[in-house]
Image: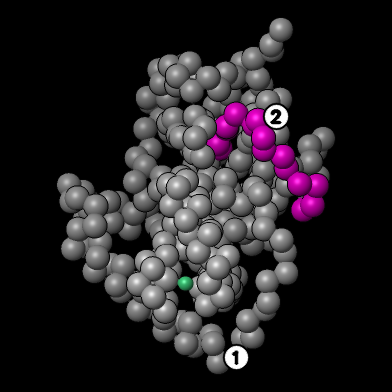
Amino acid sequence: MTVECQEFRQELGEWRRGHLAPDRARALERHLSGCPECRQWEQEDRAVGRLLSERLPRYSAAADLRRQIRRAAAGQPPHSSWWAAASAALATAMLMVMLFLGDFIPVRPRQAPPDPLQPLVRAVLSEHTRNLLWGEPRPETVPAALPRLMEETRIELARVFMGDDEVRLVGVQPVVLENRWGLALFYRDPADHTITYLLLPGQGVSVPDRNRVRVDGFRPMLSRVDGFSVFIWKHGGLACFLISDLVSENDLARFREYFRRIRSGTELVPTG
Ligand SMILES: [Zn+2]
């Protein structure tokens, strides 16, 4: 393994999440295609990540815990010692889990061809998880912010689902994903699950026909990534994503219901 290999291996996670600068991503892909060792490493890395997300139970942090984490991190620069310590602890825990799982769970070979939608879904997911950690619910600011953000992001909606007695719209913010300006709306349900509704310009995004589910008259794709459920669909010229950690069978029924309400509560501005 060369120094170059080492550098690239450290960037694999960022690359998979679509966070690497385009020229760096290209360099990494070139390296991967020429270096069988790194290719092997990447495949194993990916398989382990998938296993962890499939086999480990996940619990959403209670509101109180989230507040404590935010308070602990408030005012500290990124990559502070707090974060370094937390990452190190997490890495150790992951390693122990890997060793533990490694004994009796066979690593499945990779079967599916690379999914062109995957980098985008990764980017959408990281937006969702970032909000889980750092987002403050501020429902009172939404009515004033929404029209301005629609103008800024050019995601124009004639009608937005503003929540009901169960799901509350608690925040809205502009996002830039894969060089697209988009709009993210954050909802909370009574059990304190965050549901992110993200809208992006849909040019060049096509939603594959597989994994479609029927919800009322709609047929969104349902994708499970890293312990999250993601509905993906096109609405007029927009690519739409609905993300939550509602993954169990009961929770999924609830998530479908949220999808139905949010989808039918949203209308595009008619063009022409
Ligand atoms: Zn290499």
**Does the magenta segment cover residue 205?**
yes
Q: Nearer the viewer, residue 101 or 74?
A: 101
- Residue 102 to residue 125: above or below: below
- Residue 50 position within the rendered picture, expressed as x and y whole percent measured from the top left: 58, 69
- Residue 203 position within the rendered picture, expressed as x and y whole percent measured from the top left: 65, 30
Instruction: Please name the residue that numbered disc 2 is placed on.
Output: 235
Q: Which mark is residue 33?
A: none
Which quadrant of the figure has residue 32? bottom right
Q: CA distance from mark 2 to mark 1?
A: 44 Å
- Residue 98 position within the rendered picture, expressed as x and y whole percent measured from the top left: 48, 82
Residue under the image location 24 percent in, 52 percent down: 78
- Residue 204 to residue 9: above or below: above
**Residue furthest front as drawn:** 34
Tell me if I can see residue 168 in this picture: no
Task: Determine if the C-beta at disc 1 is less than 8 A from ligand 1.
Answer: no
**Does the magenta segment cover residue 176?**
no
* Mark 2 in CB contact with mark 1 (< 8 angstroms): no
Q: Earlier in the sequence, mark 2 or mark 1?
A: 1
**Residue furthest top as drawn:** 272
Residue under the image location 41 percent in, 21 percent down: 145
Residue under the image location 42 percent in, 25 percent down: 142
Instruction: Please name the residue that numbered disc 1 is placed on.
Output: 104
Q: Which residues are magenta?
A: 197-211
